[in-house]
Image: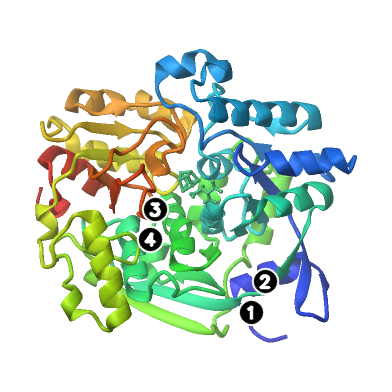
Amino acid sequence: MGAKTLYDKLWDSHLVKQREDGTALIYIDRHLLHEVTSPQAFEGLRLANRQPWRLVTNLATPDHNVPTTLTERAAGVKGIDDDIARIQVMTLDENCDSFNITEFEINDARQGIVHVVGPEQGATLPGMTVVCGDSHTATHGAFAALAHGIGTSEVEHVLATQCLIQRKMKNMLVRVDGELGPGVTAKDVVLAIIGKIGTAGGTGHAIEFGGSAIESLSMEGRMTICNMAIEAGARVGLVACDQTTIDYIKGRPFAPQGEHWDLAVNAWQDLKSDDDAQFDTVVELRAEDIEPQVSWGTSPEMVTSVNGQVPDPEKAADETQSKSWLRALEYMGLAANQQITDIRLDKVFIGSCTNSRIEDLRAAAEVIKGRKVADTVKEAIVVPGSGLVKRQAEAEGLDKLFTEAGFQWREPGCSMCLAMNADKLGAGEHCASTSNRNFEGRQGWGGRTHLVSPAMAAAAAIAGHFVDVRHF
Ligand SMILES: CC(C)[C@H](C(=O)O)[C@@H](O)C(=O)O
Ligand code: SF4
């Protein structure tokens, strides 16, 4: 048999049936659920009088709508002010109760953003297929798992049959070799990749991230990179399984134990692309060339180095690009050729499934230690990715560092990443955000999002404008 990529191996080991029209039936090992994309799926099961096919594969948690202030959280689900949010979270509770699905409810310490919770619990394992009604399911590919988002009707399909109809994607390799400089993080790497290949660069492909710079990343860093594969147009991001992966998983609640652990570790050894595997597309970056990144526009590909400038639409490659840059500058309230370091911030958000894990909070805390949030910054919030991340951060005293500096320390959830709860930007406000999308209105109507790493967001909060965290 020919050499295979990691994606080929994961695909082949889950292929139930290849059909002549090019579609295939794929088996799903893990199904994660949240409150936004599951209600109609459960309703569909009920109407068809079906039960979930394999209960133990499902794990649910509310995240998108949950409030993040202690006062609102104290009263549990009934205390959620917003009617739609409360109904969605209650509906998830009721559905999980009636179908017997494990759920970490709103005030369970294990609750959090579904893409933080899955890996943290060891529910995401190498070699698995993992799906969730959420585009950032790509995150779980950091564990050499075939993971991607699905739509609500597919959520119902997976619940009912544990299978999905898919088409095989093409293989793409993004290699980052060399050593990242101090202060340059996984977030900067993935933003630089998207800056290079564009938001359509990975369309139709499963992207495997490899090379020495990726291999030297922690699991948190690898998750940050795979999380944004979808922002590069690919539904799937992947990193090969190695000792870092295995060490991260060991001892987690859903991970195999005892003799099953040894068998699993043995089976995971092959979860990497063969040396001579062929990729349809290969992109290469040098780690040394990557500087801390800041997005200036309304798409993640509109990104540059913190030491760069807002581009000039007159210098765009073509008419289409010129128009989209002009429109972005207008929305963002920025001028062509403006220094990135001259952009002043109104709000700072440290959180989201891209950057709300313990390592992210440590990196931000390190920067703000003993400093104060600038007076001109109206609100700076830290939203841990899960209750367990929050607890760990508190045990390390990070919450004190944040609150002493003038940050608000919140309860876990998606929060200002997409402003489905009360955490929002006002019109015209600029936000340094560790999330993954800077679309128009993403963080609130008229809000202006700048995507950055946690360390860069922390430095911006202190300075009141963007600064190169390497010299801060
Ligand atoms: C609400 C959900 C369907 C959506 C997604 O799929 O990504 C959200 O998580 C997002 O980040 O925009
Ligand atoms: S944190 Fe943001 S990107 Fe992640 S699942 Fe929630 S809304 Fe989507």
Kindly report which numbered mark, 4 or 3, lies closer to the viewer in this rendering.
3
Q: Is mark 3 within 8 Å of ligand 2?
A: yes
Q: What residue sits 54% from the left and 30% below the top?
A: 85
Residue 120 shows in this picture: yes
At x 69% / y 47%, what residue is drawn? 31
**Residue assigned mark 2:** 9
| Picture residue at 51% right of the left edge, 33% below the top | 65
Q: Which residue is mark 3?
A: 436
Which label sits in the foreground, 1 or 4?
1
- Disc 4 packing (10 Å; few <14; some 14–19; many ≥20): some
Which numbered disc flags the more N-terminal residue, 1 or 2? Answer: 1
Queried on whether the Cβ of the residue with tag 4 lies below 8 angstroms from ligand 2, the answer reads no
Name the kind of residue labelled 1 in the image.
Answer: Lys
> Farthest residue toward the right?
49
Q: Residues within 10 Å of mark 3 (few under 14, many from 20)?
A: many
In-front residue for pair 158/38: 38
Please, what is the three-letter code of the amino acid marked with disc 2? Lys
Q: Which residue has dot 4 on it?
A: 216
The reply to whether dot 1 and dot 2 touch (C-beta < 8 Å) is: yes
